[in-house]
Image: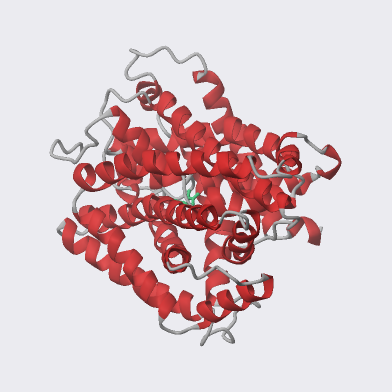
Amino acid sequence: MVKNDRANFGSKLGVILASAGSAVGLGNIWRFPYETGNHGGAAFILIYLGCVLILGLPVMIAEFLIGRSSQANTAGAYRNLAPGTHWRWIGRLGVLTGFLILGYYSVVAGWTLEYIGEAVTNGFVGKDAEGFKSAFNQFAANPWRPMLWMILFMLATHFVIVRGVEKGIERSSKIMMPALFIIVLILVVCSVSLPGAEAGIEFLLKPDFSKVDANVFLGAMGQAFFSLSLGMGCLCTYASYFSKQTNLTRTALSVGVIDTIVAILAGFIIFPAAFSVGISPDAGPSLVFITLPNVFQQAFSGIPLLAYLFSVMFYVLLAMAALTSTISMHEVSTAYLHEEFNLSRKKAARIVTLGCIFLGIFCSLSWGALKGYTLFGMTIFDLFDYVTAKIMLPVGGFFISIFTGWYLDRKIVWAEITNNGSLRVPVYKLIIFILRFIAPISIALIFINELGLFKLL
Ligand code: PFF
């Protein structure tokens, strides 16, 4: 089944930057800081690091080996490796999950463009906390503006995807990821040198274990999966473009380290600045779009140029991080349609883009005109978020571990992890043990917790 004409990433650096581009996104800069804020700072970070190391990395290696050994999109991967079985549904579930996440993720990604515009045109100046709140609410409820930004964001994603794996995904990651790193570093330096920033730094470095309960562990595991793009075949699809020489274990380690560093540095941008002006970071979308613009204005009130540059750079950073992630989600569905239905890549991409815009319109309108339309008490946007992140990703991750740990021929697993015996991987046995036992059991616990079953019990 191995097709030799399959697209490939052109270099080792391209492999790492594209995969890290998928991982680094709104999950790092928006979700991680507020989860940290909610769960007591440094203690949460320590537990999160543990989750990345002992759960995230093995599951990432599993996705990598499934993708590379099958040389196919995620649905085709399971069909190739387990022909005639129901495992192909795991791949299909991944395609659907990516498509649905893209539907609402692109709405938030679109907001970042509005905020770049606001920052560039000095729109934050002179607003107080109430002003930022009503500005955001008015904008999000507007029927046209957020929708147009979302469509523009999807078109940018589409533009990269149709250029292909090497010229589109790899090249854009090679430009955006280093730029993103530079912006992150500049923002960290500015933020930690603010007067009164020490309280924020202490919050990030001094663990307060009194806040640690089962919820913190489970929250950290969920965050690790979302942030590392695991559970929906995204990194499996990317790995189908890896060369046979790519060291899967080392690549997973690099992606995990980059993703974690960016998440922690995002904390070092947000907390010192917020603490320095005495604003406690709220949860949810409000942190990045309501609290932060206010924090930036207040923190640099003495130096308006710095407030201006800081705000512009922050939203550019957010948009770039989101773009490298939307590209990866788009690729999952595009590769699926392209390979499974024999459509040209262009046509497949067009269908995915139009489909996501269609979903995005509903998700966008659910902040305004469709706000009253709820299911289980959730708006369309919240429902998409809930169903994908809290149900579909954990289910996907669970089955990926079971598939690799229990079903897949051990010879294939060994050949992929050690590149046919040419690499020495001292942690090989540990990876297998985690995939067989630790990962499925822990994921099952996250799943049960997130559905609220513990509370019911
Ligand atoms: N990892 C991305 C982030 O942190 O924003 C989100 C994501 C991308 C989730 C790709 C899942 C995925 F397949």
Q: Position of residue 120 (x, y in %)?
A: 42, 64
Up-down relation of residue 456 to residue 1 (above or below): below
Residue for point 55% across, 81% down = 138
Residue for point 34% across, 40% down = 18
Q: Position of residue 85 (x, y in %)?
A: 38, 48
Residue for point 41% across, 46% down = 22
Residue 337: quarter of image: bottom left
Up-down relation of residue 41 to residue 255 (above or below): below
Residue 424: quarter of image: top left
Left/right placement of residue 218 relative to residue 431 reads: right
- Using the image as rendered, state which of residue 407 and residue 28 is in the foreground: 28
- Using the image as rendered, state which of residue 404 and residue 127 is in the foreground: 127
Left/right placement of residue 315 relative to residue 373 reads: left
Residue 418 shows in the view: yes
Residue 208: quarter of image: top right
Up-down relation of residue 457 to residue 443 (above or below): below
- Using the image as rendered, state which of residue 108 and residue 68 is in the foreground: 108
Colouring chosen for the image of the structure: secondary structure
Residue for point 47% across, 28% down = 253
- Name the quarter where the N terminus is drawn: top left
- Using the image as rendered, state which of residue 23 and residue 287 is in the foreground: 287
Left/right placement of residue 87 relative to residue 194 reads: left
Furthest residue to the right? 210
Left/right placement of residue 242 relative to residue 403 reads: left
- Name the quarter where the C terminus is drawn: bottom right
Q: Position of residue 277 (x, y in %)?
A: 72, 55
Q: How many marks?
A: 0
Residue 446 shows in the view: no
